[in-house]
Amino acid sequence: MSVKTKIAYVCTACGSVQPKWSGKCPECGAWNEMVEEKVVKRPEKVTAESRREPQPLTAATTKKIERSVTGIEEFDRVLGGGFVNGSVILISGEPGIGKSTIVLQVLEKLKGEKFLYFTGEESEEQIRLRADRLGIRDPRIWVASENNLENILYQMDNHRPAAVVIDSVQTVYSDAYENVPGSVTQVRECAGRLLRKAKELGIIAVFIGHITKDGMIAGPKVLEHLVDTVLYLEGDKQNFYRLLRSMKNRFGSTNEVGIFEMKETGLIPVGNPSHFFLSERREHVAGSAIAVSMEGTRPFLIEVQALVTQTSYGTPQRTANGIDYRRLAMLIAVLEKRAGFPLRTQDVFVNLVGGLKIDETAINLGLVAAMASSFRDIPLDPMSVFIGEVGLVGEVRSVPFIEQRVKEAVKFGYEKIYVPKHNLRLLKSDSDSKIIGVDSINHLLGMAL
């Protein structure tokens, strides 16, 4: 069989192959992402036996999905109930965030006779040292410092493991291609062949992936399309919490998140995140408010802190930890324009306790309440909770999952729960907590301060 090699240009953003170079990818529109690659093409023969005829959707057979449960509740929650046999999972995150650690912990909990762990970045001794630190001494886990694709595929055929780990997929290379490991062609082709082998053998495959400086998974975008599940392990390495978030899941919901605490013995699941993030809160202090955030389908309480003080410089400082800086600037402008707070001469610092990063707008009301409390130096009622989105004209807009948010606040004994007025019709108060509907920030501040 003859092999043809030619020069082409591959977009690192979407993985599309183009015959000519251009500054802009014609497929996805990314600028300056075209890199030169040597693409190897082999002629393919399609036989009559390999063709599949289409059939009606109603005639397609279905069967119950078999899952392998790890027993790590937070991990299983994100996967949708555990691993699906024959599935391919990509776990990505910043260097040192705990990707290899959590994978080792998962392998120890999985049921199976043998697991293969291939590492292209560390030696077998380094993996053993990590396992000893985590207290893992499982003879079912076999490790190999190997990043040659052909050797990995041979070992998968030879050992027939229940699960295989590739750490990391960007280091794997194939002798069939002249490109260096980590190039677009190598990552795409190696991942594709590993995926086909895992499906053929019916084993679980876990890819550990690098990320770029922009926080995206390194390599072609097609890598994320190939796999069944994409997980991100997030968090600040200076803090003790980690969030495992599902960005894609063919066998479950993408609205779930797992919360872990990093300790010397590994990542420990946090079953009650609300208590976890409120355990060190100081009451009767100006600038502190409680908001309710939704991570997937799970609500939890989070403390929002604000410090508003007279600026010592010509231009006031604006610092946001855990929320988008532009959202903070917008809320400051709304407070100044709609509520009459002269914040143009004030430094404003906002922090979400625990190092959390939250994008949803339902915590806006808590942010506004905390900043107003700090500016007036008047503590908010420590038994109050604030739920709602704040609009540009100062209105408080309704938010989704209001029942779950309110139930979480009631469970922790909070007595006053401020919610958008339009959400009141969805709530039934059967507790001692007082649910208060507000329609604007002026309405809220008139009652809370």
Image (spheres, grey):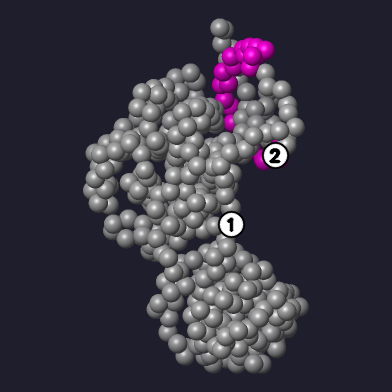
Observer able to see residue 345: no
Residue 402 in magenta stretch: no
Q: Position of residue 336 (x, y in %)?
A: 68, 82
Residues at badges 1 and 2 in contact (C-beta under 8 Å)? Answer: no
Q: Amino acid at mark 2?
A: Cys
Residue placed most toward the observer, 149 or 194:
194
Q: Secondary structure at mark 1?
A: loop
Q: Is residue 197 above or below residue 328?
A: above
Q: Residue at x 43, y 74 (%)?
A: 275
The residue under the point 73% across, 26% down is 54
Q: Quadrant of residue 161?
A: top left
Residue 222 in the figure: left or right of residue 87:
right
Work out how far the residue at label 1 is from the one at label 2, CA to CA, in angstroms.
26 Å
**Crowd class of label 1 (few under 14; some 14 to 19; many from 20; radius 10 Å):** some
Please report the bounds of the magenta region as a residue range.
26-50
Percent across and percent down for residue 282 are 42, 84
Q: Secondary structure at mark 2?
A: loop
Tell me how many marks there are: 2
Quickly name the residue at label 2: 28
The C terminus, quarter of image: bottom right
Residue 117: % across, % down: 35, 36
Mark 1 lies on residue:
255
